[in-house]
C-alpha cells in the first residue's frame, strides 16, 4: 500500500468511528440534550463538534485534505450500506444526517489544513 492509500484508509476508519460516536444509529443520545437545550441549539452543538473533530482528525492523522475527504466518502458509503442492511430504515433521513456530518468533518479538515 502506498502512502495515499494509507491516508485514505486511516481517514475512512476515523470518519466511520467519529460518525458513529457523534450520531449512533438507534441510540441518539442527543435527543436528551435536545430536551434540555432545544433542538436548534443541540444541532448547532453537533455541527460545531463535527467541525472540531474534522479539524482534529487532519492534524492527528497527518493526512491531506483530499485523502481525508476520500476516506470520509468511503466511510459514508460503508455506513449507509450497514444501516440499510442492519436497521432497515423506513425513510432515507439517515442519508441526509450522516451526509451533513461528513460535510462538517470535511469543513473542519479544510479549516485545519490551511
Image: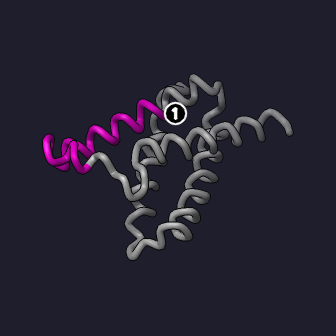
Q: Residue furthest bottom?
A: 90
Q: Quadrant of residue 82?
A: bottom right
- Residue that appears at 15% across and 41% down: 37
Q: Is residue 38 left or right of residue 48?
A: left
Q: Position of residue 48 (x, y in %)?
A: 34, 35
Q: Residue at x 42, y 30 (%)?
A: 52
Residue at x 46%, y 34% (from the top left corner): 108
**Is 7 colored magenta in this rendering?**
no
Quarter holding the N terminus is top right
Determine whether 112 is above or below 46 in the image.
above
Q: Residues within 10 Å of mark 1 (few under 14, many from 20)?
A: many
From the viewer's perspective, is 33 left or right of 108? Answer: left
Magenta: main secondary structure equals helix
Q: Nearer the viewer, residue 59 or 89?
A: 89
* Magenta highlight range: 31-53
SS of the residue under disc 1: helix
* Residue 45 covered by magenta stretch: yes
- Residue of label 1: 109
Q: Total marks drawn?
A: 1
Q: Position of residue 70 (x, y in %)?
A: 64, 47
Q: Nearer the viewer, residue 58 or 14?
A: 14
Instruction: Give residue 113's position: percent from left, percent from top.
Output: 55, 27
Residue lying farthest to the right in this orientation: 1
Q: Is residue 114 above or below residue 89?
A: above
Quadrant of the rendered image containing residue 11: top right
Amino acid at each position: 500500500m502506498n502512502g495515499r492509500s494509507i491516508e485514505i484508509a486511516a481517514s475512512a476508519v476515523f470518519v466511520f468511528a467519529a460518525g458513529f460516536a457523534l450520531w449512533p444509529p438507534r441510540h441518539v443520545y442527543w435527543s436528551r440534550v435536545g430536551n434540555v437545550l432545544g433542538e436548534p441549539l443541540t444541532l448547532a452543538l453537533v455541527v460545531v463538534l463535527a467541525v472540531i473533530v474534522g479539524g482534529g482528525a487532519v492534524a492527528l492523522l497527518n493526512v491531506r485534505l483530499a485523502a481525508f475527504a476520500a476516506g470520509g466518502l468511503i466511510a459514508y458509503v460503508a455506513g449507509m450500506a450497514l444501516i440499510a442492511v442492519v436497521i432497515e430504515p423506513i425513510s432515507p433521513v439517515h442519508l441526509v444526517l450522516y451526509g451533513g456530518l461528513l460535510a462538517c468533518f470535511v469543513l473542519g479538515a479544510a479549516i485545519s489544513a490551511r
